[in-house]
Image: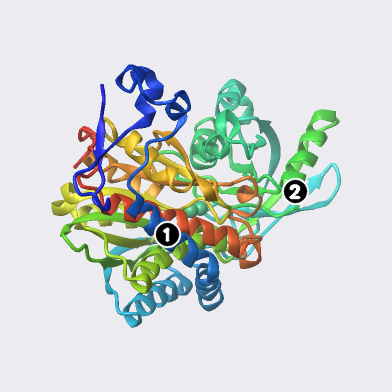
């Protein structure tokens, strides 16, 4: 099958660019006169797209604008947990900034959960007194005012918990699984599953509390928070994350088995009534098909321990600066590029769900969505989840980013939590892939601060995002859509 892709930005209108990748997949016979090495090249869009990319990459690299945006956001708002004054400052900051720069910007109302942390302490009582560095998981109920004191029992993960059966009764379950920065079976996702459902699972077996080894990849005795949830009809036991070092200590104490290991935890967190908040949505209208939309998104909210610089202030800066570069350089692709700054990605996804609901009528005209929510490390490329042939087109566009090391394309994934909601509606989903080797060192911890961001790496991320967004918005034909999935409402 010889597939061709027309690229609108080609100066030779109608020229079709052969997708070299298909040559590599056994279609070499289609081009007998080409030297063999050509079969190794990626499909490429036309030279005009290279020019656009060169301008975007150059602009991103000569300015510190992306870094200045995230620094300004974090320094002006502090932490931005949904429902907090910081989150509202974040909404106002983004709205005013985009409005004052002349963009078409709206605040779109949603309702968000409002959980507050309060005071929190923990300690080992026996075999000897020892302060534990812990932090409540988002959504946890408080302990009784005097604290919760109980014996600790260790489980590696949810399967291990099930094996312990009745032995967890009246105890605090310590889930003690080290996650790996390399992803895969032991990646962050495997730990996040335990964090989210561990308390309910432990409560079903009679446990009275939950401790989680922090889902982090650095060892600086800082706890990492994150969201958890209870189940209807199951006891709501308090849940906190301890530092990796403290989890290791508890493990060693339990291993020696000279009498019980008892801890006390005191959590002052609580869930208040839901409050009104907003997504911030800004458009850069297309020159030919303004009704068709390439959405680029990130989330404005953050956890409360740090200031949400890498998660996800960096993403906010990447997508905002993309729009600002289009304006500054006078680049207007055929379709509209829309920035969506989501609220409440961290503990409810109300922004993602609210956007899909509010824009239900135009989701058929969302031709792609890209999310930036993997920190501020340098860009590696994109993930793509779309219809037949979509991956080859993304390969073609990303090939232009080879010079900045961002040409990698992987198939599958959901792009990001906020935009995953659009997948069932058939919207092709892309994620900006980044170097995340250090992301989980800081993410959701007090260490998520502006100083963790390298301005040059962040600028490269913006360059990659802007190039891909422009390329998608300027295609002759939009990416093919995945068939709508049954969960689409
Ligand atoms: Zn995030
Ligand atoms: Zn997060």
Total numbered labels: 2
| Residue 63 visible | yes
Residue 120 appears left or right of 368? right
Residue 1 appears left or right of 211? left
How crowded pointer 2 is (Cα within 10 Å; few <14, some 14-19, many 20+) is rated as: few
Is mark 2 in CB contact (under 8 Å) with mark 1?
no
Residue 375 found in image quarter: bottom right
What residue does disc 1 label? 299
**Residue at point 35%, 80% (across, down):** 101
The local secondary structure at tag 2 comes to loop
Q: Nearer the viewer, residue 476 or 439?
A: 476
Q: Position of residue 377 (x, y in %)?
A: 58, 53
How crowded pointer 1 is (Cα within 10 Å; few <14, some 14-19, many 20+) is rated as: many
* Residue occupying the far left of the picture: 361
Q: Nearer the viewer, residue 465 or 37?
A: 37
How far, Cα to Cα, is label 2 from label 1? Answer: 27 Å
The local secondary structure at tag 1 comes to strand
Indicate yes or no: mark 1 CB to ligand 1 under 8 Å.
yes
Against 51, is 431 above or below? above
Against 316, is 40 above or below? above
Q: Position of residue 260 (x, y in %)?
A: 78, 35
**Residue at point 40%, 36% (across, down):** 413
What residue does disc 2 label? 219
Against 2, is 220 above or below? below
Q: Position of residue 254 (x, y in %)?
A: 78, 32
Q: Position of residue 166 (x, y in %)?
A: 59, 25
């Amino acid at each position: 099958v010889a597939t061709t892709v027309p690229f609108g930005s080609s100066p030779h209108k109608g020229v079709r660019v052969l997708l070299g990748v298909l040559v590599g997949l056994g279609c070499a016979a289609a081009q007998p006169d080409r030297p063999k090495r050509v079969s190794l090249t990626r499909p490429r869009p036309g030279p005009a797209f290279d020019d656009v990319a060169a301008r975007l990459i150059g602009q991103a690299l000569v300015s510190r604008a992306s870094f200045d945006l995230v620094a300004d956001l974090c320094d002006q708002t502090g932490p931005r947990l949904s429902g907090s004054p910081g989150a509202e400052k974040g909404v106002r900051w983004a709205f005013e900034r985009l409005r004052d720069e002349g963009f078409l910007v709206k605040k779109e109302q949603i309702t968000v959960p409002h959980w507050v942390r309060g005071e929190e302490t923990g300690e080992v009582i026996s075999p000897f007194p020892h302060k534990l560095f812990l932090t409540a998981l988002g959504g946890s109920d408080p302990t009784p005012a005097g604290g919760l004191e109980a014996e600790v029992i260790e489980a590696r993960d949810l399967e291990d918990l099930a094996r312990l059966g009745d032995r967890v009764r009246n105890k605090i379950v310590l889930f003690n699984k080290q996650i790996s920065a390399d992803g895969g079976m032991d990646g962050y996702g495997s730990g996040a599953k335990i964090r989210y459902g561990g308390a309910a699972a432990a409560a079903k077996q009679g446990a009275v509390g939950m401790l989680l080894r922090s889902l982090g990849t650095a060892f600086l005795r800082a706890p990492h928070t994150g969201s958890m949830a209870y189940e209807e009809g199951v006891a709501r036991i308090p849940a906190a994350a301890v530092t990796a070092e403290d989890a290791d200590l508890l493990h060693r104490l339990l291993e020696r088995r000279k009498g019980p290991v008892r801890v006390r935890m005191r959590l002052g967190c609580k869930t208040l009534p839901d409050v009104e908040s907003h997504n911030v949505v800004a458009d850069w209208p297309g020159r030919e098909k303004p009704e068709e939309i390439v959405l680029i998104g990130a989330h404005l909210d953050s956890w409360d321990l740090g200031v949400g610089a890498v998660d996800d202030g960096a993403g906010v800066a990447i997508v905002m600066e993309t729009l600002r570069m289009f304006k500054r350089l006078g680049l207007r692709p055929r379709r509209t590029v829309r920035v969506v700054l989501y609220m409440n990605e961290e503990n409810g996804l109300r922004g993602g769900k609210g956007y899909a609901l509010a824009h239900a009528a135009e989701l058929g005209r969302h031709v792609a969505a890209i999310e930036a929510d993997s920190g501020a490390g340098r860009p590696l490329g994109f993930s793509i989840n779309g219809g037949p042939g979509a991956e080859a087109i993304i390969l073609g566009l990303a090939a232009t980013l080879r010079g900045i090391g961002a040409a990698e394309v992987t198939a599958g994934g959901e792009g990001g939590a906020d935009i995953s909601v659009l997948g069932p509606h058939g919207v092709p989903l892309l994620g900006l892939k980044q170097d995340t080797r250090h992301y989980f060192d800081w993410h959701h911890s007090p260490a998520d601060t502006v100083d963790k961001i390298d301005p040059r790496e962040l600028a490269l991320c913006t360059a990659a995002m802007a190039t891909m967004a422009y390329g998608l918005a300027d295609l002759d034909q939009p990416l093919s859509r995945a068939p709508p999935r049954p969960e689409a409402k």
